[in-house]
Image (cartoon, rainbow, N blue to C red):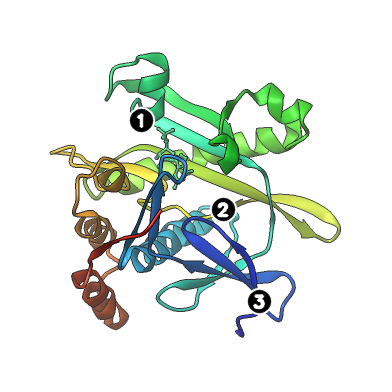
Amino acid sequence: MKKGKKLYEGKAKIIYATQDKDLVIQYFKDDATAFNNQKKTTIEGKGVLNNRISEHILSNLSQIGIKNHLVKRLNMREQIIKLVEIIPIEFIVRNVATGSLTKRLGIEDGTVLKEPLIEYCFKDDKLGDPLVAEEHIYVFEWANKKEIEKIKKMILRINDFMIGMFRGIGIKLIDFKLEFGRLKTNGKNEIILADEISPDTCRLWDSLTEKKLDKDRFRKDLGDLIPAYTEVARRLGILHEQSNVSVVNVTKLSSVKKKTK
Ligand code: 5GP
C-alpha cells in the first residue's frame, strides 16, 4: 500500500492518506509527551513496541466481536486502519484509583473501585483535555445518546476482556483511555473502537510487585520505559517471531534523547 500525504500529526502518531479513500496509514512515533505537552522526549523503540502491542490487543478484541479500525500491521511502525470520524471524547476507564482521579477527589492511591468507572474528557490539547459530564456530550452534540450507550457497552466488554488477558500474564489493568469513531457503511454510521491500546494509553502494574509497566515510567521519571514495554510485549507472547529480533535490537539501542521544548 502506497503512503500518500500526511493528513494529521498527533503527539505519538502520524496519519497518512493511501490510494484508498477509506483507509489510512497510522505511523507510531517514538515521541513521548506528558502533562499536556509540557514534558517531551524521544524514546527510541517505543513506537515499534506500541505498534506491536496495540495490534495484538485490537486483533484479540476483533475476535470477541469488538469492531475496531485495525486492518493490518504493515511493518515495524505502521498499520493500515479504517478512516473514521473520531468522536472528540477520551473515554477513561478505571478499575483502581490512581493518577488524576486521586488528585481530583483525594481518594487513596491504589483503592480498588467496586465497579469500573468511566470518565469523559473533551479531546482538546489547548484546554488540557478537560473532564466533562455525559450531559456536556449531548448539549454540545459531540455524540448522541444511542452512540454513548453503545460505547459504554463496548467499554465494559473491552475492560472485562483486557482485565482477564492481563491477569493471565501477571499484570493488573489499573486504568486506560479509549477513543471511538464513526465509520460510514452503506450510508449509515457505525461506532467502532479507534486509536491505540498500549502501555502509552493504559496503566499496567505487575501483579506481584506493583511495578509500573507503562507510560508512568516517563511521567514520573522512573526510567527503564523500554524494558517495561518490552516486558509487556514478551508476556503477551508477541516477541518471538523473526521480525521481533529487530524489535529487540531497536529496544537495545534505546537511548533517551532530550528534545528542545
Ligand atoms: P489520568 O486521568 O489518571 O491521567 O489517566 C487515566 C488513564 O488514561 C491512564 O491510563 C492514562 O495513560 C490514560 N490517558 C488519559 N489521557 C491520556 C492522553 O491524553 N494520552 C494518553 N496516551 N493516555 C491518556
Query: Disc 3 to disc 1, how far (Cα)?
Result: 37 Å
Q: Which residue is mark 1?
A: 99
Query: Disc 1 to disc 2, how far (Cα)?
Result: 30 Å
58 vs 253: above or below:
above
Q: Closer to the camera: disc 3 or disc 2?
A: 3
Is the residue indicated by label 1 positioned so its CB lies within 8 Å of ligand 1?
yes
Q: In the displayed structure, does residue 10 sit left or right of residue 241?
A: right
Q: Which residue is mark 3?
A: 5
At numbered mark 2, what does the secondary structure look like: helix, strand or loop?
Answer: loop
Sequence-earlier tag: 1 or 2: 2
Q: Position of residue 244 (x, y in %)?
A: 28, 76
Residue 114 in sight here: no
Return the residue nearer the eye: 148 or 161.
148
Q: Residues within 10 Å of mark 2 (few under 14, many from 20)?
A: few
Residue 251 quadrant: bottom left
Report the residue at 76% width, 34% height from top: 144
Residue 147 quadrant: top right
- Disc on res. 210: none
Return the residue nearer the eye: 235 or 179.
179
Q: In the displayed structure, does residue 86 sit left or right of residue 196?
A: right
Q: Residues within 10 Å of mark 1 (few under 14, many from 20)?
A: few
Q: Position of residue 109 (x, y in %)?
A: 28, 23
Position of the N terminus, as image quadrant, is bottom right
Q: In the displayed structure, does residue 109 sit left or right of residue 87?
A: left
Sequence-earlier tag: 3 or 2: 3
Q: Closer to the camera: disc 1 or disc 2?
A: 1
Report the residue at 18% width, 41% height from top: 211
